[in-house]
Image (cartoon, rainbow, N blue to C red):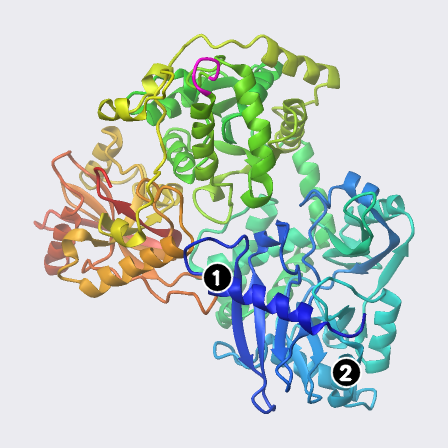
Amino acid sequence: MASQDPHQIAQLVNALNDASKQKGGKKQPFTCKKNTFAVSNTKNVTVDSWKFMDWDYKRSGLPTYARGLFTSRRRDNVPEIVTRGYDKFFNVGETKNTEWPNIEKNTRGPYELSVKENGCIIFISGLEDDTLLVCSKHSTGHREDVKLSHAQAGEQWAERHVSSVNRSVKELARTLRAMNVTAVGELCDDNFEEHVLAYDEAASGIYLHGLNYNQPEFATMSCDEVNQFAEDWGFRKTKFEVFDDIYRVQSFLEHCAETGTWDGRETEGFVIRCQLRDGEISPYRHWFFKYKFEEPYLMYRQWRECTKAVISGKTPKIRKQQQVTEEYLLFARRTFAKNPKMMDEYQHNHGIIALREAFLRERGLKGSEIVALEAQKQLEGQQTTQNVILVPVATLGCGKTTVALALVRLFGWGHVQNDNIPKVKGKPKRFANEVIQSLADREVAIADRNNHQRRERKQLMEDIHPVLPDVQFVALHYVHEPKGQLLPQIKEVTRKRVLDRGDNHQTIRAGTNDHSEIIGIMEGFLGRFEGIDTSRTPDMAFDHVVDLDVCASSRENLETVVKALHAAYPRIVSTMPSAEELDAAIAASLDDYTVEKDLSYSYGAPQKQKNKNKSPGGGVVVPQPENIAKSPSSLAKKIEYFNISLPTKEISSVLQSLFPPSTPAQTAQLYRQLVNSRRLQAAFHVTLIHRASKQDHPDIWDRMTNRYIDVQTNDPVPEPSRYPPTLGSARVRLERLVWDNRIMTFVARILPASGEDISDATSEWQCANAIPHITVGTAAPDVKPKESNDLLRRWVETGSGGDTGIFEAEVQGVKVVDGVVGLVMSRGKH
C-alpha cells in the first residue's frame, strides 16, 4: 500500500494531460484543468494541480476521483503523486449512493463520524528533497491576488504545530514521504479568514482529519491513527464518534440536526467514513459521505451573503427566515453607518462573526432558538396561499402530464397544456396568459410544457410576473444531468413510454408515424435540455425546486411533489393524501386520459422543406435538428450583436420605484403610456456592440467574436444558431433613468463580474456605445431602440428639465444586478 506504481501513475498523468489539452474535436467524457506551480526554496521543483469540474465527479470512468490532486516528477523523471485529497464525497440524498436505503444496503462499519470543522482544506506532504509541500485545494505557494494565500497560511501553522513538539518541518516531510501519505486538515483561523462558525485564538490552527495514501484509488487511515499522528506532530485533533450500526448513525445525526449542535457547540455537520461496495460480489472500498446540518448554519451563511450583497449594492436574495434576516440586515446597516470601515473588513471576511454575535446578543437568543421560532411561524401559516405556478422542466416521456393530471384530480388545481394550443404566432405568450387566467379561481396552476431550456423558463416568468407580481414559481425538475451518466437509461425508459402510448398525444403520433421519426424528435429534446441552475438567471427566480427521477414511476414522482408542496405551502396542501388516494389519482390520469385534439398537422416542416424531410412511409414531417454542424468561425459571421441580458424582475422593480403614485402626471406620462400600451421591453439588456458598429470598433468586435469562437469550440451548444452559448457573466449598475416623449432608457455602468476564478475572470466587458444603457421602452413601433444613443447624446449636451423635453430620475442607492453575457444571431437561414 505504501509505495507507488510508476506505470500506474504514468497512465494516470497521461490521461489527465490528454484531457487538459483537448481543444474541440471529439470531446472527453470529463473536463480537467491543469495548473503548474513552482515550489519555493527548491531546485526548480514544480508540481501540477489537476482540477475537475464538480459535476464530473458524478460520472463513471474518471481516472481518479481525488478532489485536490498534485503530481510531480522525481529526479529520475519518474512521475509521482505528491498530494492526494479525499475522493469527492456528497451529502445525504445528493446522489444514488448517498440515499439512505442504499447506504443501509451497500455500506459496512465501523462508521467513523468526524465533526465537520468550518475552515479551508489544507494538504501537507513531503517531497524527495525533504521539502514540506503545503497546498490548498488547487494551488500552492504565493498568489499575486492576495497578501497571504491559504497555502502560505497553512505553511505557517504547520511550522507552529511541529515546533510545539520540538520537531522540524523537514522531519515531518521525511515521515510523510516514507509513509507515502498526504496529511489532510482544516485550517481554522479567524484572524486569517472567517467563515461561518467562530474559532477564537485558543481554538485556531490546523485540525488534522485524514491521512490519505498517495494512490489513484482512494485509501485512507483510521481516525485513531490520524489522531495519534496529530498528537505526535502537534496538530489539533478532530473529534470522532464511532458506531458499528448504520441505524444508530442515522439516529445520532438526526438528533444533532434538531439543534445544529454537538458536544455543546454549533457545527456544520459530520463526515461519515465507512466502506462501500458497488454490488454484492464487489469488494468493499473506503468511502465517505457527509451529513450537513441545515440550521442554524444555513441561516448564518445567508446572513453573510446577504450582507455582502448589501455592501456591494446588490439586492440580497433571501430564501428562508425572511423576517429575521431583514431585521439582521437593518442591524448591519446601522452598525456600518456608525463604523463605515467595517464594510471593507467584512468584504475581506473579517468581522462577520462579531457582527452576527452582536445581533444575537441584542435579540437575546441563540441561532438555534431563532430557527425554532421561525419554524413555528411557518407552522402557524405565515405562507403563500395563492398564485403558485408549477413549472415542469422535462423532456418527452418523463411523465409530466401524468403527474399534472393526478395533481388536478387530488386538489382541483388549474392545468394548462401547451400541447392543446395550436402552433400559431405568439403561442408562448398565449400559453402564459392561459396560465394566468387559470389562477383566477384557483390557488395553483400547472404550466404543462417541457420548459426544458432556460429561454422558455425566462419567457414564461417575464410574461407572467408583470401581471402577477407576487407569483411563486416552483420547478418540477426532472433531472437529466450529468447527461453522460443518466441519458442511456433515460432514453430507454422514455422511448418505451412514448411508443407505448401510441397516438394518445396531441402532436407526437407514435402509433401512426415511423418510430425513427419519433425517436429523432426525442433526441432533439434531450440534446437541448438545460437543467435547473439556481445560481444563474432565470432559474434563480424559482422559489422552490423539486428534483424528480425521470426513470421512477409517475406514482413515486407524484408523492415526491405532494410532499414537497405540503412542506413549502401548508396552507395550500394542508394534509398529505393517503397512499390509496395517490394510487387512485395516478390510475385515473393513466386510464381515463385521452387527447381530444390532433394538432400534429401544425408541427410539420416549413412548406419548402416538406419533400426533403418527409419520411418514406408518409406521416408527419419531423422538424430536424441542425444535422450539418457549421464551424464556430462561420457562425460568427452571422452574429447581429453582443449583449448583457439582465433579470426582468429586478429591472422592473427599480423602474416601478421611480414612479410612485405621487409622481406628477407630466413626469410620468411616457411611463404610464408604456405600461398601458404594453410597450415596456419584455426582456432587458445592455448592448455591448452591434454589427453596424464593428467598423468603428474593430477591437471590441474582434475580441467578442474570438470569445464566442473559443466558447463554441471548447464547450459547444447543440444548436448554436438558434440558442447561442453564454459567454460569461457581468454586473451592471443602474445609475439613472432618462426619457423624453419617445423613448426611455437607463444609464448603466458595466462592472467586473464577481465570484469568478481569478485566472478566468474578465475585468470588464467593453461597450461600443458612448454611454452603456438599457432601453426600457419606446412610444411607438416606428421608434427604434437605437434612438437611446441619440437621447443620451442630447442629455449629455443639454441636460434635462426646462425646454429640453428630457426628464431624468436618479436611482437611489447603489443598484447592481447580475447579468449574463451573450449574443443574438441575425435572422434568416444560417
Q: Is residue 335 visible?
A: yes
Q: Is residue 124 above or below residue 294?
A: below
Per the rendered image, the range of residues in magenta is 510-514
Look at mark 1 in the image and give the residue it sits on: 755
Q: Position of residue 623 (x, y in %)?
A: 35, 28
Q: Amino acid at mark 1?
A: Gly
Quarter residue 747 falls in: bottom left
Q: Quadrant of the C terminus?
A: top left
Q: Amino acid at mark 2?
A: His
Count of all numbered marks drawn on residues in the image: 2
SS under mark 1: loop
Q: Residue at x 38, y 23 (%)?
A: 431
Magenta segment includes 512 = yes
Q: CA distance from mark 1 to mark 2?
A: 33 Å
Q: Please give left or right for residue 644 compared with residue 103 in the image.
A: left
The quadrant holding residue 45 is bottom right
User: Along the horizontal axis of the image, is 40 left or right of 297?
Assistant: left
